[in-house]
Image (tube, rainbow, N blue to C red):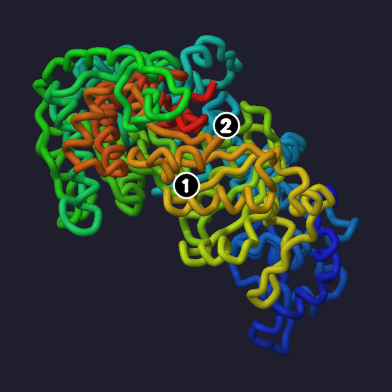
């Protein structure tokens, strides 16, 4: 049986499998004859789950378990995880040896679907792949790969290599490309400490090919010669006859990322055109040396001294008790002008795949863009050999050896906020977020990061329009620090869906206590300046000025034009901001604000364009050097293992009518 923590507790246990089976069977075509019983290893639930459930109900005891296993496979294939778990929990004890192997494989697949990768790996470690038939081995090795989350390791390489002989056609070539991607993402430390068995000839060949590529990729002729010699030494290696796609593209193996010819993929028309043009202006300014690079990380004194988008960062003499600001430091000289050739491709009039193909034909050495999420999804599946710095990231990031993802997103800020709040030793956060898709995105990102940090329940409370908030002010109701738990994949797995209606799992005792607001010690608010001007007084109205909860806000609420009354009203609130607008690069700030008519949202995109130029110039280091980071205008920039560019923001606080750095 599965551990109790993945069973359908409370509500789930009230739904017998027989009822679920009848529900699904009711949708299946009726037949007067029992279908012939297939082997579970040959038929992995390729028909609909309703049909298998019907066969299960009509079967005698000696074949019922086989139909049940097939029904579980089908439910997993259809994404009906909870029904699959419920049916899995009722499997009988007296299974045959083959059925027990099927049961173990299903257990691992369920754990993977529940994102419990450690548990899945533990199950798989107990399975002997040599005892499995061919179809079972396909499932086994694919489960090992999925449980690894594609993190490069010796175990992942072995799983890919074992899977390769079982595949044909496009799946076979994808396996080879996946092996190569895992090899290129191994760190130097992993390569130097790797110990393999004497009989692992295929793995040894792959490691030698990676070494040839790493040593000679700056010289295309040497690399070509090295690959040919390798193919002679390892004729039986699957890569000898079907080279990884990247090694068949000269642009991808000609050495470290070059910025000699950059293709800039942006939507120059339509709703996103203003954002794209602003990013382009910042990119061009940095490329032409018209702006200085960001200064060193500003300390408290530097923030007081440097020009900022927030006048209150320089103490305001008009405020009682305020000190006189330090002299403003002189801006650093601009950086050197680059001779790189930039060509812009309009993705609003040309599909992304065509723009990429044209950029490759034009001799581009690196691509910056595209900007829109659906366009980034397209480049991920394009298999382009070009190095690409995407200016957004897909919902599910794929680790590609030639792609990095750079985005200014509310999710990015939410993750940074979770880290900041955690570092300040708060453990029971409440999210005050809008009742729309933005709120959904923030809640998901914050809760996911919070769990990664080791946190537990994250509460959320939604708010409506400005009119709704004003009515709350007028009624004197205020805002109580209570909420409902954010639903994550881990909490969603215990809900039950019947007839399209999802019944959430009963809350735990801790969640009930937290939902009542007693334990909330931090509130993260995602709101405009007008909204937060109402929200913070409403919190005070309900909790009093001495509430134990620390308030935090995203840069969405930050406006440089806020006057002294607003600053006093926001007393104690901490908010995040990019370094450029908080003293990190005075020259760029002045240039950006002048370019966008003091629109601070656009100014951040201008800074993004400038940072995109810096990232493009350090693409190889970001893609290949673990822990590599850059001091950017939009944050301290570093790359994850998937080359997602993370941003560490500055945090400021309203104190006695002033805006000061958080100590």
Left or right: residue 417 versus residue 562 is: right
Where residue 149 appears, as percent x and y from the top left, is 56, 37
Q: Inspect this view and state whether residue 648 appears.
A: no
Neighbours of disc 1 within 10 Å: few (<14), some (14-19), many (20+): few
Which of the 4 quarters of the picture holds residue 116? top right
Q: Give the mark nearest the N terminus, 1 or 2.
A: 1
Against 224, residue 455 (above or below) is below
State how many labels appear: 2
Q: Position of residue 547 (x, y in %)?
A: 69, 41
- State the CA–CA distance, disc 1 to disc 2: 21 Å
Residue extending furthest right?
94
Residue nearest the viewer, comparing 300 with 393? 300
The answer to the question of whether label 1 and label 2 lie on touching residues, with beta carbons closer than 8 A, is: no
Image coords of residue 342 (percent x, y)? 11, 33
Q: Is mark 2 on a helix, strand or loop?
A: helix
Residue 618 visible: yes
Q: In this view, does 39 lie above or below 457?
A: below
**Between 226 and 190, which is closer to the camera in this rendering?**
190
Residue 497 location, quadrant: bottom right
In the picture of the structure, the residue carrying the numbered disc 1 is: 396
Q: Residue at x 22, y 29 (%)?
A: 590
Q: Nearer the viewer, residue 48 or 301?
A: 301
What residue does disc 2 label?
419
Residue positioned 59% across, 64% down in the render: 78
In the rendered image, which quarter is residue 384 located in?
top left
> The C terminus lies in which quarter of the figure?
top right
Using residue 455 as the reference point, say whether residue 197 is left or right of it: left
In this rendering, the label closer to the viewer, 1 or 2: 2
Q: Is mark 1 on a helix, strand or loop?
A: loop
């Amino acid at each position: 049986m599965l551990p109790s923590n993945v069973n359908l507790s409370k509500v789930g246990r009230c739904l017998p499998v027989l009822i679920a089976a009848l529900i699904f069977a009711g949708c299946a075509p009726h037949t007067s004859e029992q279908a012939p019983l297939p082997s579970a290893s040959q038929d992995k639930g390729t028909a609909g789950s309703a049909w298998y459930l019907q066969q299960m109900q009509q079967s005698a005891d000696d074949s019922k378990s086989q139909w049940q296993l097939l029904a579980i496979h089908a439910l997993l294939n259809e994404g009906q995880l909870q029904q699959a778990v419920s049916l899995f929990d009722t499997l009988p004890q007296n299974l045959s040896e083959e059925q027990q192997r099927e049961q173990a494989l299903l257990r691992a697949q369920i754990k993977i679907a529940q994102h419990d990768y450690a548990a899945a790996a533990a199950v798989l470690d107990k399975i002997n792949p040599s005892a499995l038939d061919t179809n079972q081995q396909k499932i086994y090795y694919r489960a090992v790969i999925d449980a690894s989350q594609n993190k490069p390791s010796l175990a992942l390489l072995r799983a890919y290599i074992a899977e390769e002989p079982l595949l044909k056609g496009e799946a076979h070539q994808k396996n080879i490309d996946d092996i190569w991607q895992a090899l290129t993402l191994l760190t130097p430390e992993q390569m130097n400490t790797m110990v393999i068995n004497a009989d692992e000839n295929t793995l040894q060949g792959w490691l030698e090919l990676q070494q040839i590529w790493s040593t000679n990729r700056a010289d295309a002729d040497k690399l070509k010669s090295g690959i040919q010699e390798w193919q002679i030494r390892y004729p039986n290696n699957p890569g000898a006859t079907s080279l990884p796609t990247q090694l068949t593209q000269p642009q991808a193996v000609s050495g470290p990322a070059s910025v000699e010819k950059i293709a800039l993929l942006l939507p120059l028309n339509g709703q996103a055109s203003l954002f794209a043009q602003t990013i382009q202006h910042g990119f061009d300014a940095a490329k032409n040396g018209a702006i200085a690079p960001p200064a060193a990380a500003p300390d408290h004194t530097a923030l007081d001294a440097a020009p900022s988008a927030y006048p209150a960062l320089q103490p305001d003499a008009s405020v009682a008790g305020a000190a006189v600001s330090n002299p403003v430091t002189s801006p650093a000289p601009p950086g050197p002008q680059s001779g790189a050739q930039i060509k812009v491709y309009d993705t609003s009039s040309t599909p992304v795949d065509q723009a990429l193909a044209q950029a490759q034909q034009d001799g581009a050495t690196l691509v910056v863009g595209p900007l829109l999420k659906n366009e980034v999804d397209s480049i991920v599946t394009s298999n382009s050999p070009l190095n690409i710095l995407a200016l957004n990231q897909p919902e599910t990031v794929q680790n590609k050896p030639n792609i990095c993802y750079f985005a200014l997103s509310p999710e990015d800020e939410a993750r940074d906020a979770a880290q900041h709040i955690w570092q300040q030793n708060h453990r029971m956060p409440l999210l005050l977020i809008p009742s729309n898709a933005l709120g959904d995105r923030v809640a998901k990102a914050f809760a996911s990061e919070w769990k990664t940090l080791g946190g537990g329940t994250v509460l959320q409370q939604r708010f409506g329009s400005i009119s709704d908030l004003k009515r709350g002010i007028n009624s004197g109701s205020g805002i109580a620090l209570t909420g409902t738990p954010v639903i994550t994949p881990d909490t969603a797995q215990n809900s039950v869906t019947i007839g399209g209606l999802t019944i959430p799992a009963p809350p735990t005792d801790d969640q009930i206590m937290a939902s009542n607001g007693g334990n909330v010690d931090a509130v993260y608010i995602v709101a405009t300046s007008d909204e937060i001007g109402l929200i913070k007084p409403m919190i005070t109205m309900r909790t009093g000025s001495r509430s134990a909860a620390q308030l935090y806000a995203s840069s969405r609420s930050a406006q440089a034009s806020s006057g002294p009354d607003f600053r006093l009203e926001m007393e104690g609130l901490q908010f995040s901001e990019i370094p450029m607008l908080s003293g990190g690069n005075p020259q760029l700030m002045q240039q950006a604000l002048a370019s966008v008519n003091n629109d601070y949202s656009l100014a951040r995109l201008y800074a993004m364009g400038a940072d995109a130029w810096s990232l493009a110039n350090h693409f190889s280091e970001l893609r290949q050097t673990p822990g590599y980071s850059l001091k950017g205008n939009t944050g301290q920039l570093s790359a994850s293992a998937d080359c997602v560019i993370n941003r560490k923001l500055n945090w400021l606080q309203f104190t006695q009518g002033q805006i000061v750095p958080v100590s």
